Image (spheres, coloured by chain):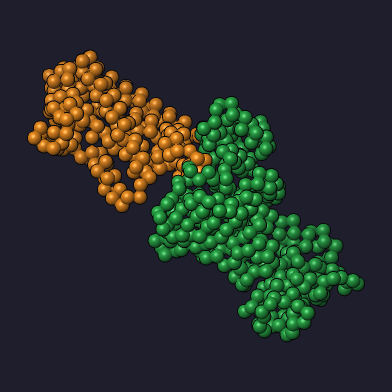
Amino acid sequence: MDWTAAWVTLRLALWTTGILCVLGLPLAYWLATTRFPGRGVIEALVTLPLVLPPTVVGFYLLVATAPERPIGQMLAAIGIDRVAFTFPGIVLGSVLFNLPFAVRPFTAAFQSVERRLVEAAWCLGVSRWRAFTGVVLPLAWPGILTGLVLSFAHSLGEFGVVLMVGGNIPGVTRTLSIAIYDEVQALNYAAADRMALALVGFALGVLTLVYLLERKGLRR
Amino acid sequence: MSAELEVNIVRRYPSGFEVAASWRQPVDPASITVLFGPSGSGKTTLLRCLAGLEQPDAGRILFDGTCWFDAATGRHVPPQRRRIGFLFQDYALFPHRTVAGNIAFGLAHLSRNERRRRVAELLALFELEGLADRYPHELSGGQQQRVALARTLAPHPRLLLLDEPLSALDGPTRDVLRRKLRRWLQALSIPAVIVTHDWLEASTLGEQVLVLDDGRVLQQGPVAEVFSRPASTRVAGIVGVETVVPGEVQAVENGLARVAVGTATLMAVAPSELNGRVHVCIRAEEVTLLPAPPEATSARNRLLAQVVRLEPEGALVRVELDAGFPLVALVTRPSREELQLEPGRTVWALIKAPAVHLVPR
């Protein structure tokens, strides 16, 4: 078992999920409540990584974040000088690639909260923020949790984007799925098997948890 | 500035549908206005504009000297700062909060102790003691309605907006709550605007009524007057006047009009200006049925009528009669038996002259 790779993988999944939570929730709430006519385009963009090959996402990410490009300069301004072959780089790729896995369940969860309940809160003199935290969040919570767990589980197994953007640097960008690929290339099937089994077991556990939570949400 | 609610608004929809209404009502002392009309007539739109949940396209809303909305200046006070209580048609209780949690939701500005006291006060007022820890889905419809009302009143609103407050309830519960709602509204003396399409609800609860149809106000005024003296056959139909038949005024003497209706003649209190052709409107509950001609009665109109059809309507029976013109009466079940009402039987129908309302046609 490649524990260094396991640690990189876990860090990647945690960072990805955390960033998706911070960026994805407002985006999903906006998508669920807006009447903006261009909403369909934004939704298509969010869903795009679901159908694109990870290599395409990785390729465009590399091109767009080159230091001489505007996005590359913006990233440099927040302290990320380089995307290629770095840990922040693979986090960025993973966030983009997992966007639909988080935002789509979030949006569905927000849409399932009846508008009248929010209006009822407003009419009670409660601020928009407290109506959101006191009514929308608790009611949408099972769906939000589903989105978080799905994107966490999915980013654990990330391969294509990570390989394209991060390469294969032990301790930096070498994740479990890349380590498995390496072991198979080296005909070291026993080591590959152990790591693959660990990923399968983990993913199965996480998905079981999601379905249990969804059941609980439905019972309400 | 007098203590008044002054509404004069127009709301337009992209489909071309337009809702317009204008009325005033005293805020202190509290008064109750009923927005009455069939579904789709725009009543709820007006209520949502008052709450600030929707913005009118023209006009303004003034409450007790404060401007809530003015299309001319672009002023729009959000619902949070209007201090209103909005009771939704299906209550919109928070499913994840207990009864106490629902009632306390609008009381975040109070201290813990004050909040607890206010919740206890409302639980007692609405006879909800013992239900504080239940969730909405564990309550009956009548209990949910009372919780919703308690939650609405908890933050001391200055104006109550009730959207079909009793429509989601079954018959017997509705009867009980209609009477209670009236007592509560009187006891709390909060001005209110109530949307309904049930005339019993309107006449029990309201003082002033606006009859709406297709986004327009057809008639407005004191409830008793509008319901007994509809300005047109359309209003008569909406407010549920059962008998509306064409007639011809033959003579007016001493403020009484003699009207030929079908093969019968009726006496009616004559309105000031009246030409020959009229519609005659009679509410079913103004018609008294007797088995034999009465000896002494103040009723001006005594008609021999034949029963055409009987239809049970809850505790009452609707009697369709031929009195020389089609006439509808309402009797209780015991009096139906006492009168031995059956199709084909003849009875005497009594109607007082003020109950015969004439609408020019």
Q: Please state if A173 lies on the left or on the right of B253 as rendered.
A: left
- Name the outermost residue toward the left: A68
Q: Please state if B168 lies on the left or on the right of A151 as rendered.
A: right
As rendered, which of B81 and B162 lies closer to the eye?
B81
- Name the outermost residue toward the right: B295
The reply to whether residue A8 is visible in this rendering is yes
Q: Residue at x 35, y 50 (%)?
A: A35
Q: Residue at x 59, y 29 (%)?
A: B114
Quarter of the image holding residue B248?
Answer: bottom right
Q: Residue at x 23, y 35 (%)?
A: A96
* Percent position of residue B308, x then y: 74, 72
* Percent position of residue A202, x then y: 32, 22
* Percent position of residue B100, x then y: 58, 32
Query: Can you say whether B155 is above or below B312 in the image?
Result: above
The reply to whether residue A59 is visible in this rendering is no
As rendered, which of B236 and B110 lies closer to the eye?
B110
Query: Can you say whether A8 is above or below B128 in the image?
Result: above
- Name the outermost residue toward the front: B1
Q: Residue at x 51, y 32 (%)?
A: B108
Q: Please state if A186 lies on the left or on the right of B238 as rendered.
A: left
- Chain corresponding to orange in the figure: A
Q: In the rendered image, which quarter contains the N terminus of chain A?
A: top left
Q: Please state if B75 lies on the left or on the right of A173 as rendered.
A: right
Query: Can you say whether A217 is above or below B48 in the image?
Result: above
- Chain corresponding to green in the figure: B
